[in-house]
Image (cartoon, rainbow, N blue to C red):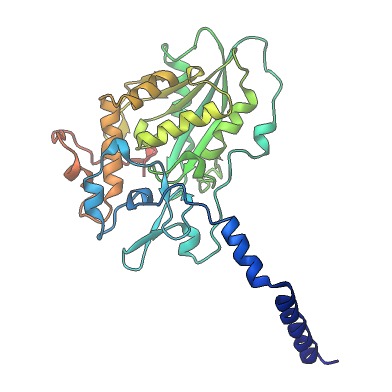
Amino acid sequence: MSGFAKKQENAKFFSKCVDDLHITNICEKIDAEFPDPEPDYIPTPLNFGISLPNNIDIFQSADWWDLPPGIMCSNCYNQVPNTYPIQQQSERVCLSCKRENFPLKTRSNEFRMKKMRFPPITNLAVNHIAVIGRQSRGKCLKSDCFHELVKFTRCWQNFPHRNTMTQNLVGYFGGHGSALALHSTMTRHLIKNSKKETYEPFSYILPRLNCYYRPGIDKITIVFYTFSALTVKPSNLISFILDFVEIKIPPKDVIFVAYGDAFSNSSTIFSPIVLNGDKLLTTLINRESTAWLDSMKWGCYARMFPTTPGRNRGNNWLQNANNEISFEEYDEEIAMED
């Protein structure tokens, strides 16, 4: 029997099965019994994180505190580290969709490192320190950027638990993604610098810290240059803290330390900010007003309006902006901005 004749025979057999088993009726009954579930929510332009010429008014009227977390690709609807304009700025999609590849979901925090536990380095209480940097396009970061932060953790006399706990530097984490994105989406490594160095992706930070942390004994300290270098959305910070809760690390055991909050001559001015996770969560939930939150808001609006003229376009949408402050160096490399 030829290949064509065999295909015809198989087609007839399949048609007979459909008729005998009443496949159409079975499918109708399945659809009636198990209808498609209602979506948890229908994405709005705000879920996509960045304004387009046809929806800029929606972003202008949005309350910064109510912005949804992260950035969503408008094609595959995944949470992604960054999006890119296509079709003459009419849409923004993730890198996979832009390249017309099969879109890959971001790697979950629940990968095998979460199941690992390292043996205690000492019987004493330990403060586990993680240093964070970020670049939206995945550019390299000089090792000096991290070394300065490590020097800060060792030399600043008011650094948390400096004199009461053993200090353990867990590692450097390089965020490859926009400050609008969730940390869990930043799964890619940064480009290697001139010394052929790269750093663990930002998404690895919770599983890595969970390898060392001993409940009721240890503390965790997250160190970075400015809050806007970490993220520019309050919803992202809340999600970050709640991710600690999910792996059973209470917010009271997590401390956030920013080197400063203002810039001068392309560098961050030394003016440390120390916030316990509980205090930070309360500040965000109560929508309190602070200088570092204003800085985050500035950074958020600057990134939400990429199609309006000028790098500092966020100023057009901020109320009570201080025009005497120069933000020309807002995205300098030393502050790990983009």
Q: Disc count in the image?
A: 0
> Measured from the top left, where is residue 106 in percent x and y?
54, 48
- Is residue 295 shown to the viewer in this render? yes
> Measured from the top left, where is residue 100 in percent x and y?
50, 67
- Whether residue 216 sits left or right of residue 175 in the image: it is right
Q: Residue furthest right?
A: 1
Which image quadrant: the N terminus?
A: bottom right
State the residue in front, 81 or 270.
81
Which image quadrant: the C terminus?
A: top left
> Measured from the top left, where is residue 228 in percent x and y?
34, 35
> Measured from the top left, where is residue 236 in percent x and y?
41, 36
Measuring 46% from the left and 55% from the top, which residue is drawn there? Answer: 77
Measuring 23% from the left and 41% from the top, which residue is drawn there? Answer: 328
Measuring 73% from the left and 84% from the top, which residue is drawn there? Answer: 11
Compared with residue 139, is residue 245 higher up or lower down, i.e. above or below? above
State the residue in front, 210 or 55.
55
- Whether residue 322 sits left or right of residue 39 in the image: it is left
Compared with residue 91, is residue 118 higher up or lower down, i.e. above or below? above
State the residue in front, 18 or 154.
18
Q: Residue furthest top?
A: 164
Measuring 29% from the left and 48% from the top, which residue is drawn there? Answer: 304
Q: Quadrant of residue 289?
A: top left
- Is residue 330 shown to the viewer in this render? no
- Whether residue 89 sits left or right of residue 121 in the image: it is left
